[in-house]
Amino acid sequence: MENYYIKSAEAFVKEQLGEDKSGHDWHHIDRVRKLSLFIAGKEAKGNKTIIELGALLHDIPDGKLNDTEEIGWKKLRSWFAQAQLDGDTIQKVEEIISSISFSAKKDTLPSIEAMIVQDGDRLDAIGAIGIARTFAYGGAKGQPMYDPSIAVREMWSKEEYRSGKSSSINHFHEKLLTLASKLNTDTAKVIAKERHDYMESFLKQFYKEWDVSL
């Protein structure tokens, strides 16, 4: 029965996000799923069915990918009803989804499953994949690659984070470079080290080429 729910969730996510061009497509979801299950295995913690469902469904209600978050949650809850998930599973998966996003600014997560899925999602936001996703998202949202006149934001609300003026390069300083220090599990922290260092190397080279004097 658990396999049925996973297969059903996969089909639902592919239908909803399969054509996404902002870096939140099926391949992102699948990487987060694999990273989360890998972390769960290494840490020997968490309910793997809850972790897998949380990873698969975590972007469905995202306000960046829907006209409103309410519309996204309606889509997800319609799938819950169609799949006939039990109430306890629904509650645990919803807790994961509502708590793990960077913009939610949650200091305490509700479960080890949420911690693991958050780590999987954050790992996919850094490193070479994270760099590629950042520019894909910026392009999809019409943001400049870089504009030195746009200051890096220090403090912002969720609404400002989503709709305020920024650039793809600023996003590294506003979010991505902070993620390695915000991970929950030892396994994720080990994986993050190489990815974080790669981003710093990329930015060093980017600024060098931007300010080139021939």
Image: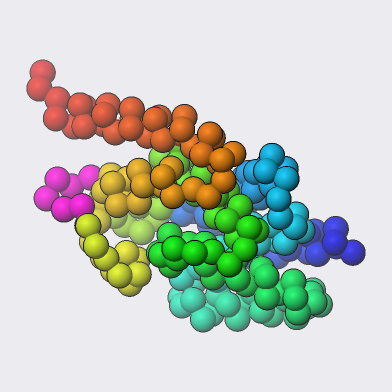
Q: In screen coordinates, is 111 left or right of 162?
A: right
Residue 145 visible within the image: no
Quadrant holding the N terminus: bottom right
Please provide the residue range marked out in magenta. Answer: 145-153
Q: Residue at x 62, y 77 (%)?
A: 75
The answer to whether residue 108 of the structure is visible from this angle is yes
Secondary structure mostly taken by the magenta-highlighted segment of the chain: loop
User: Residue at 53% across / 34% down in the picture?
Assistant: 190
Relative vertical location of residue 214 with respect to residue 4 in this rendering, above or below: above
Q: Is residue 155 left or right of residue 88?
A: left
Q: Quadrant of the C terminus?
A: top left
Magenta stretch holds residue 149:
yes
Locate residue 85: give its quadrant.
Answer: bottom right
Q: Quadrant of residue 135?
A: top left
Q: Is residue 29 or residue 17 the one in the foreground?
A: 29
Residue 10, position as x, y percentages in the image = 73, 58
Q: Which residue is painted at 71% across and 55% down in the image?
A: 46
Q: Nearer the viewer, residue 189 or 38?
A: 189
Q: Position of residue 207 (x, y in %)?
A: 21, 32
Model colouring: rainbow
Q: What x and y, as percent, mark residue 172?
A: 32, 45
User: Is residue 31 found left or right of 135 in the rendered image?
Assistant: right
Can you name the residue that lies furthest to the right here? 1
Count up the numbered dots.
Answer: 0
Residue 58 location, x and y as percent?
59, 62
Establish if 195 lies above or below 95: above
The question of residue 42 being in magenta is answered with: no
Q: Is 151 situated left or right of 125 in this image?
A: left
Front residue of 184/194: it is: 184
- For the point 51% across and 39% down, the residue is 189
